[in-house]
Amino acid sequence: MSRLIRFLAVGGLVLAGAPALAAAQYRITRTYALGGDGSWDYVVPDAKHHRVFIGRQNRVMVVDEADGKLLGEITGIKGAHGTAIAEASGHGFATSGNDSAVVMFDLSTFKVLGRIPAAEDADAIIYDPASNRVFTFNGDAHSSTVIDPVAGKLITNIELGGKPEYGVSAGDGKIYANLTDVGEVVEIDAKAAKVTRRWPTAPCKNPVAMAIDVAHQRLFSGCRSGVMAISDYKAGKVAATVPIGSGVDGAGYDPVSGNAFASNADGTLTIIHQDSPDAYRVVQTLTTMPLSRNMGVDPVTHAIYLAGAKFGPAPSGRGRPPMEPGSFVIMVVEK
């Protein structure tokens, strides 16, 4: 092979690899030491007000995105999981899973305004702007509770036919949720408050985390079987799968970069690039912290917020290891 041919061949390989290299530039840029007792669950950025809501067992912490300062807490929660922001009403909503309730609070003062009955194992919660309603996903009850965010009142409960985990709003009056026990995605008509369609996530098993790409009408289901299933939600079928880390519990999508994310209990963040609506590839596996499996993406700054902590050895080598006191942090991941 001539020197020129060798040069062109090597140059071609470099150019072919350029998109992957360009995409694989995420890193942990800041770590906020927050401390405090209790486990955690959903991490929900509030892009308009540059803050993050974090469920912490008996409360929700509200943290400044820029410097990690604790802005306040929503208290009186028994089993904190998710937070929903209904900006137009001035109200926020946090699930209180251990007493099957939702806590409504003031978005400015974080003062608790009331409690709304939900159902057993009220877990994730989202706001749907198209219907101006809040939806919970009640795992053990196999249902979704629908709430009026202005009045703070229960509208109805929707039977889902399986155990829901996370869900998303498509912004067009449709809600989508993963049913982890039966391996399905379920579609909900938000205004009619009823299930309209469902489809399997196979070969993905135990779908939990979910994110959405509205422009291309795709759903990203993070599955405990070690894959992310990408569904075409207009066609109602899985269009692609891609490998992710183990123990996923959080997912996100950034339409600007075309990257999807899966935060995993094995201490990794899987970063997946969308080459086309039906073609995906892993471009980076970022090391985070063991059991750092909950995340949120700020759609304005494109920063990813990951919750994490240090853990001691598991008792007798089994079960969940104890969290070291004061070790809770938020990691900020950026390009």
Image (cartoon, helix red, strand yellow):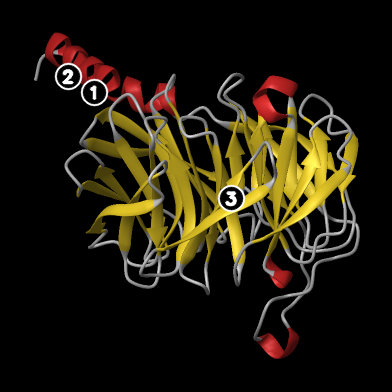
- Quarter occupied by the C terminus: top right
Instruction: Report the amino acid beneath label 3.
Output: Ile
Vertical comparison of 121 with 328: above or below: below
In the image, 135: left or right of 56?
Answer: left
**Contact check, label 2 and label 1, Cβ < 8 Å:** yes
Vertical comparison of 16 with 5: above or below: below
Viewer-side label of 2, 1: 1
Instruction: Report the amino acid beneath label 1.
Output: Leu
Q: Specify which label sits upstream in the sequence, 3 or 2.
A: 2
Q: Determine crowd level at label 2: few under 14, some 14-19, many 20+ residues with C-alpha closer than 10 A.
A: few
In the image, 53: left or right of 130?
Answer: right
157 and 236: which one is in front? 157
**Contact check, label 3 and label 2, Cβ < 8 Å:** no
Circle 3: element type: strand
**Which residue shows up at 32% across the image and 24% down it?**
215
Viewer-side label of 1, 3: 3
Instruction: Report the amino acid beneath label 2.
Output: Ala
Instruction: Give residue 125's mark.
Output: 3
Circle 1: element type: helix
Viewer-side label of 3, 2: 3
In the image, 169: left or right of 101?
Answer: left
Position in image of residue 294 (x %, y %): 61, 51
**Which residue shows up at 79% across the image and 73% down it?**
322
Instruction: Give residue 116's mark.
Output: none
Circle 2: element type: helix
The quarter of the picture where residue 278 lies is top left
Position in image of residue 325 (x %, y %): 90, 63
Instruction: Give residue 9's mark.
Output: 2
Instruction: Give residue 13's mark.
Output: 1
